[in-house]
Image (tube, helix red, strand yellow):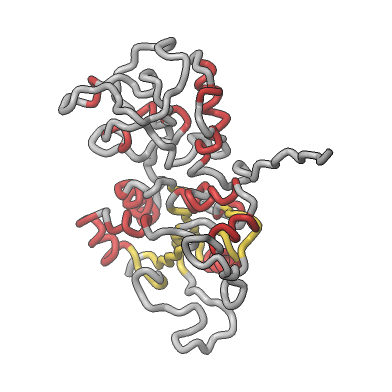
C-alpha cells in the first residue's frame, strides 16, 4: 500500500495534470506502488457530497499527501482548498497558478466589475447578456495564490511544472527525504554566451528573430538580454531546463518568467527593473512593464491602475 494521496484542481487549465502524465514510464511505479490515490477529480469519480449527493457538507478523504493545482478565484476554490488543508498532512501547491497566481491573476490588474462586463457582455456574443449570479460560485475580490489562504508545505512552480521535478517531489515524500530542487535563477542554468555589460542601452520588443546560427549549439548563441531582448531569466526561478538549457532559451526565445520569482517573496517587476538599470539599460524602454508580472500577479503584486480623475470645467 502506497502513501495516501488526494489531488485537487482549482482555477486551472489542467496543464499541471498533463505534466504529471508527462513523467512517462516512471509514472507507472509511482501510481501502482508509491501512491494510493484516494481522491482526484481528474482521474476518478469521487463526489464532494457523496456519490448520490446525500452529503450536507463538502468532504474529501483523509490523506498523507495533498496536491493542489490552480489559483483561488472564487468561493468554491476556497472551500475546496480549506478542506484539502484540513484533510492532508502535507499539502503541495503545484504549478505557477497555485504558487503565484499564474495567468488567471492577470485579472488582478483590472477593475473586477469592469472585467465581468467585458467578458459577459461583448458585441461579438450577446451584448445584453447578464453576468451570471445564480448557481455559480461567487468570485473573490481578486485571484489568490494558495499560500495566501492556507498553509502550504511545499511549492513547485512552473507553467507547466517540469515532470522530472514533480517525480522528484513525490518520490522524496515517499522516501522520507528532502527533494533535490533547483535553487537558482534561469540565468544560472543558461549556457548562452555572455560578453558583458554595455552592449545595448534600450530594450527592444521580440518582433524579430534573435541573432543565432540555425542548428548551432545553444552555447554559441549570445545572451538574449545582451542582444537587447527582454529576457526574464535573471529574475525567474530555474526548473524548466530540459536537455541542458532552459525551455524558452532552447527555442531561441527570451524567458517569459513562468516559474515565478527566484526568491519566495520576490517581485519580478521590481527585480527586473533593477537588473536593467544595473546593466545601463533604460527600464523606461520596456513596453507594458506590468506584463512582467504576467505569471506572478498574486500576493497583492498586481493591482488595478487608478486612473486620474479629470475635473470638468
Residue at screen point 27% across, 21% down: 211
In the foreground, 252 or 70: 252
In percent of width and height, residue 152 lies at 54, 53
Query: In the visual, does 109 lie left or right of 285?
Result: right
In percent of width and height, residue 119 lies at 54, 60
- Residue 151 to residue 249: above or below: below
Residue at screen point 55% across, 65% down: 127
- Residue 276 to residue 152: above or below: above
In percent of width and height, residue 56 lies at 59, 84
Residue at screen point 59% across, 49% down: 108
**Res. 154 in view:** no
Q: Residue furthest right?
A: 313
Q: Quadrant of residue 146?
A: bottom right
Quarter the N terminus occupies: bottom left
Query: In the visual, does 29 lie left or right of 86?
Result: left
Q: Residue furthest front?
A: 313
**Res. 210 in view:** yes
Residue at screen point 37% across, 39% down: 239
In the foreground, 27 or 310: 310
Amino acid at each position: 500500500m502506497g502513501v495516501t494521496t488526494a489531488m485537487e484542481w482549482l482555477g486551472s487549465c489542467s496543464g499541471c495534470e498533463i505534466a504529471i502524465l508527462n513523467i512517462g514510464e516512471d509514472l507507472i511505479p509511482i501510481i501502482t506502488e508509491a501512491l494510493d490515490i484516494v481522491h482526484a477529480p481528474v482521474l476518478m469519480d469521487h463526489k464532494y457530497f457523496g456519490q448520490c449527493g446525500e452529503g450536507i457538507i463538502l468532504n474529501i478523504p483523509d490523506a498523507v499527501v495533498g496536491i493542489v493545482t490552480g489559483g483561488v478565484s472564487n468561493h468554491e476554490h476556497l472551500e475546496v482548498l480549506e478542506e484539502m488543508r484540513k484533510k492532508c498532512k502535507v499539502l503541495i501547491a503545484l504549478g505557477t497558478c497555485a504558487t503565484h497566481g499564474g495567468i488567471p491573476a492577470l485579472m488582478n490588474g483590472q477593475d473586477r466589475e469592469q472585467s465581468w462586463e467585458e467578458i459577459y457582455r461583448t458585441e461579438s456574443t450577446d451584448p445584453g447578456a447578464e453576468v451570471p449570479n445564480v448557481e455559480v460560485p461567487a468570485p473573490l475580490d481578486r485571484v489568490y495564490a494558495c499560500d495566501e489562504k492556507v498553509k502550504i508545505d511545499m511549492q513547485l512552480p512552473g507553467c507547466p511544472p517540469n515532470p522530472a521535478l514533480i517525480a522528484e517531489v513525490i518520490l522524496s515524500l515517499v522516501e522520507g527525504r528532502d527533494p533535490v530542487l533547483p535553487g537558482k535563477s534561469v540565468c544560472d542554468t543558461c549556457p548562452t554566451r555572455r560578453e558583458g555589460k554595455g552592449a545595448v542601452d534600450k530594450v527592444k520588443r521580440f518582433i524579430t528573430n534573435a541573432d543565432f546560427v540555425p542548428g548551432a549549439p545553444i552555447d554559441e548563441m549570445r545572451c538574449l538580454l545582451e542582444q537587447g531582448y527582454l529576457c526574464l531569466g535573471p529574475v525567474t526561478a530555474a526548473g524548466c531546463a530540459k536537455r541542458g538549457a532552459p525551455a524558452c532559451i532552447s527555442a531561441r526565445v527570451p524567458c517569459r518568467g513562468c516559474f515565478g520569482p527566484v526568491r519566495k517573496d520576490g517581485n519580478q517587476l521590481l527585480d527586473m527593473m533593477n537588473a536593467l538599470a544595473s546593466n545601463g539599460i533604460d527600464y523606461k524602454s520596456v513596453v507594458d512593464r506590468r506584463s512582467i508580472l504576467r505569471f506572478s500577479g498574486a500576493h497583492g503584486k498586481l493591482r488595478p491602475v487608478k486612473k486620474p480623475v479629470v475635473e470638468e470645467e
